[in-house]
Amino acid sequence: MIKFLDLQKINLQYQKEIEAKLLQVFRSGWYLLGKEVENFESDLANYIGVKNTIGVANGLDALRLIFKAYKELGVMQSEDEVIVPANTYIASVLAISDNGLVPVFVEPDPQTFNIDISKIEEKITSRTKAIMIVHLYGQVVFSEELRILAEKYNLKIVEDNAQAIGAEWNGIKTGNLGDAAGFSFYPGKNLGALGDSGAVSTRDDQLAETVRILANYGSSKKYINKYQGLNSRLDELQAAVLDIKLKYVDRENEKRRKVANYYLENIKNPEIILPFISDCPVNKSHVWHLFVIRSEKRDELQEYLSRNNIQTLIHYPVPPHKQEAYSSYNLLSLPLTEKLSGEVLSLPMSPVLTEEEMEHICKIISKF
Ligand SMILES: *Cc1c(COP(=O)(O)O)cnc(C)c1O
């Protein structure tokens, strides 16, 4: 069976280094709010090219904390609206609604499946306070027009950068394109921990300070609480592992690009639409968290691949507005998002996929 993602194989590449470090942290007796987190935060900030990063417990919390901080700072209030792509993982939307803000869905670009920037302005009202962009599947979504639009209406741009660490737009890394960004280091992400963790990045010192306090019970001084915060901290063990893996993330993203290029050149089947890249495939606008193909015969194709020992996944089978959790949005009509959810299929994608596996996958798919 060719696995969709072989996490064990990915992490065993760094076995010696990680095991030695874990043992060191274990023996240190210091497990939270220590120098491993500090080191990782500063290395991540350098890597992104952004002034502040704050390690938190997971990617959803990173996004939740950004909006919570904007509310504490008076930038946003309950019932304010946040533009969000309709075609995204539910966490993007949860971060908004959990803060009493209202998600306003925008349909995807039919080629990239990322938010259609040209459809944002028509959704802006007097209550709109932010645009959330999601660099879905690892592909950057940004433009000068978007920046100008945000400026014109005085909107914050919040990046959901859970899937695109290392991607760049005109030499600027994702996580430094908007006003604030949330990262996820869920084990399966391009930079994955050995459990849950995440981070916030921002140029804005005041926002950074507020997020840091909110993530630590709303307290900057022990037992003195400024806000009604959360407990959402990155721990020392995860930070130590992430700091090691961060050194290799560019190399791993480069391998993902090789896999993607191989697929793009070798999958030949009229039943299948291959992913579209805004620029040339070798550049840095895509870090290929996922390689998502599209087919009207998606379910049949997935079953065929499974019979041929190729594991695939669907990102995502039910869009957020069609979930029971968002029943008040269930009747919204977002036809392109809905159509995509019935046609997308994610092929095995990882930095440790072998040439033989890639060859086999392409051969099998081309025969479907
Ligand atoms: C993974 C993911 C998240 C949430 O991250 P967690 O660490 O799992 O909480 C948010 N948004 C997107 C687009 C994701 O893929």
Image: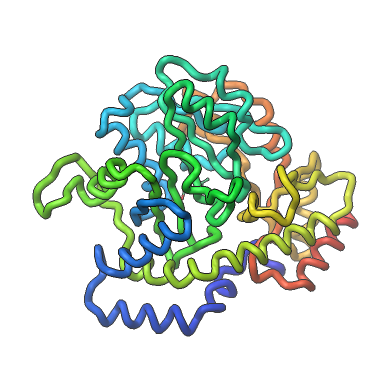
Please indicate, yes or no, whether residue 322 appears anywhere in the rendered image: no
Please name the residue shown 48% across and 31% down the image: 131
Quarter of the figure with residue 35: bottom left
Percent position (x, y) of residue 165?
A: 53, 55
Q: Is residue 49 above or below residue 296?
A: below
Please name the residue shown 67% across and 66% down the image: 255
Report whether 340 appears left or right of 10.
right
Please indicate, yes or no, whether residue 9 appears anywhere in the rendered image: yes
Quarter of the figure with residue 117: top right
Please name the residue shown 90% across and 57% down the image: 367
Query: Residue lying furthest top in this view?
Result: 126
Q: Pick whichever, 319 or 255, lies toward us.
A: 255
Percent position (x, y) of residue 322?
A: 56, 31
Quarter of the figure with residue 65: top left
Percent position (x, y) of residue 242?
A: 43, 67
Query: Residue lying furthest front in this view?
Result: 171
Q: Is residue 42 above or below residue 247?
A: above
Percent position (x, y) of residue 34?
A: 25, 67
Report whether 190 appears left or right of 228.
right
Q: How many numbered circles does the render carry?
A: 0
Q: Is residue 40 above or below residue 326?
A: below
- The colour style of the image is rainbow
Q: Quadrant of the N terminus?
A: bottom right
Report whether 10 appears left or right of 48.
right
